[in-house]
Image (cartoon, grey):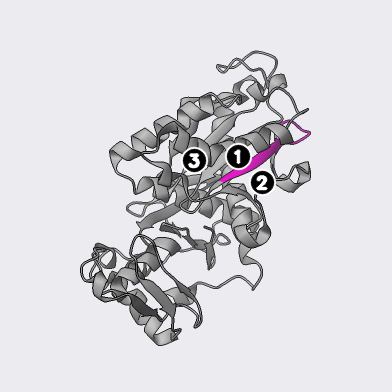
Amino acid sequence: ASERFRRPKRGGENLISWLALVATVVFLLGLVVRDGYGSAAGGGVPDRTGFSASAAPDHILVIDCGSTGTRLNIIRRGEDGVTLQAVSWEEYRVPFPGYTPKKHGYNRLETTPGIHNQAGAGDEGVRSALDPLLLWAKEALAGHGDPAHTPILLFATAGARKLGEADRNELMASVRRVLSSSGFRFRPEWAKIIAGEDEGIFSWVSSNYKLGKFAAGDGGVVNMLELGGSSLQASYVVNGSDAGAREVEVLGRKHGLKVQSFNGYGMNDAFNATLYHLLGDTAGGLEGVEDRRVVAHPCLQRGYAFEPKEIGVRFEGAFDSEACSLAVLGAFSASELSEKGVARHHAGVGGTGGGDIALAGF
């Protein structure tokens, strides 16, 4: 199935991922801003948030809580008062403590690890992930209006989705308390864990928009695989009458879309599955680990080694492409994912789009 998907030219992966994130944020904001600020567009009549169109915010902050990190995105309203534009944090010339391109990989404002790791740590744990971003935003936007008029939104994805219900609820309660006291404009409903299918739709919309595919109609949009840290989303263009299809309207045109999110297929979770597989335990337990202190990993470069704290085994690189493929296949062969896997979904849906693309961002 993977043969249908082409890889972007070398050097473009980070760019495509960044553009996808930016456009996804803009798409989400279109819904929230319309609901919160847009009803007064015809004049100075306040909408149900208490703001008139003339008082619409110049900036909107969106926090993306992925499985590997928590990122801040800055959206600026255009001079026409309608369009929303993603802005690079570097434009504000305010340093972010601890940032180095080599450490972060992507050119973005980020704290690590993912905020879901703070489940059970209360408000202080959540603050450790959010406060550096909030403090940076206050300094960067000084002179750009009252922070109390600047909305801040937060969307969490697969890392938070895989938590148990009690941990999810506790984590999001802490998130809402921290954002409510941040000094920025915030509503409790502006912080949420989005479903995997919605994540797939947003990524599909953003990628096709940035690639200019919507101008060509249904024949031009592409199907998409989007790899995150914990999950993978598969989005296919189908006839609107197909069972399970969701109708997505973009720029006045309706598209039938079939989307499935695969938890555990993200880069980090899938790689972790190979670790347990190589230990001889695909269930993820640690039986027998004390007898295996060093394990060769065929997917890692020779000369590289690491020791995950939660396992206590040293994995040493012993790259072999064939053995790596077998390790990956073996990690999932006995799991439920194999019954509902990407390859089966891909073969069963196919998609009617004008091509396919795969991208990664984690």
Badge 1 marks a residue whose secondary structure is helix
Q: Earlier in the sequence, mark 3 or mark 2?
A: 2
x then y, percent, for residue 268: 43, 62
x then y, percent, for residue 140: 73, 36
Along the line of sight, which residue is nearer the eye, 109 or 5? 109
* SS majority, magenta: strand
Residue receiving disc 2 = 97
Does 140 appear above or below 341? Answer: above
Q: Identify the disc placed on residue 56.
A: none
At 23% from the left edge and 64% from the top edge, which residue is drawn? 283
Badge 2 marks a residue whose secondary structure is loop
Asked whether, in this view, residue 175 is left or right of residue 134, the answer is left
x then y, percent, for residue 59: 69, 33
Instruction: Say few, some or many: other residues with alpha carbon within 10 Å of mark 1 (under 14 / 14 to 19 / 20 or more).
Output: some
Q: Which of marks 3 and 1 is nearer the N terminus?
A: 1
Asked whether, in this view, residue 279 is left or right of residue 178, the answer is left
Instruction: Say few, some or many: other residues with alpha carbon within 10 Å of mark 2 (under 14 / 14 to 19 / 20 or more).
Output: few
At 25% from the left edge and 71% from the top edge, which residue is drawn? 290
Residue receiving disc 3 = 155
Does 324 appear above or below 121? Answer: below
Does 30 appear above or below 258? Answer: above
Residue receiving disc 1 = 132
Q: Does the magenta stretch include residue 53?
A: no
Q: What stretch is highlighted in magenta?
A: 71-81
Along the line of sight, which residue is nearer the eye, 287 or 209? 287
User: What amino acid type should be assigned to the residue bearing mark 3?
Assistant: Phe
Q: Which of marks 1 and 2 is nearer the N terminus?
A: 2
Along the line of sight, which residue is nearer the eye, 306 or 260? 306
**Contact between labelled residues 2 and 1, with CB atoms less than 8 Å apart:** yes
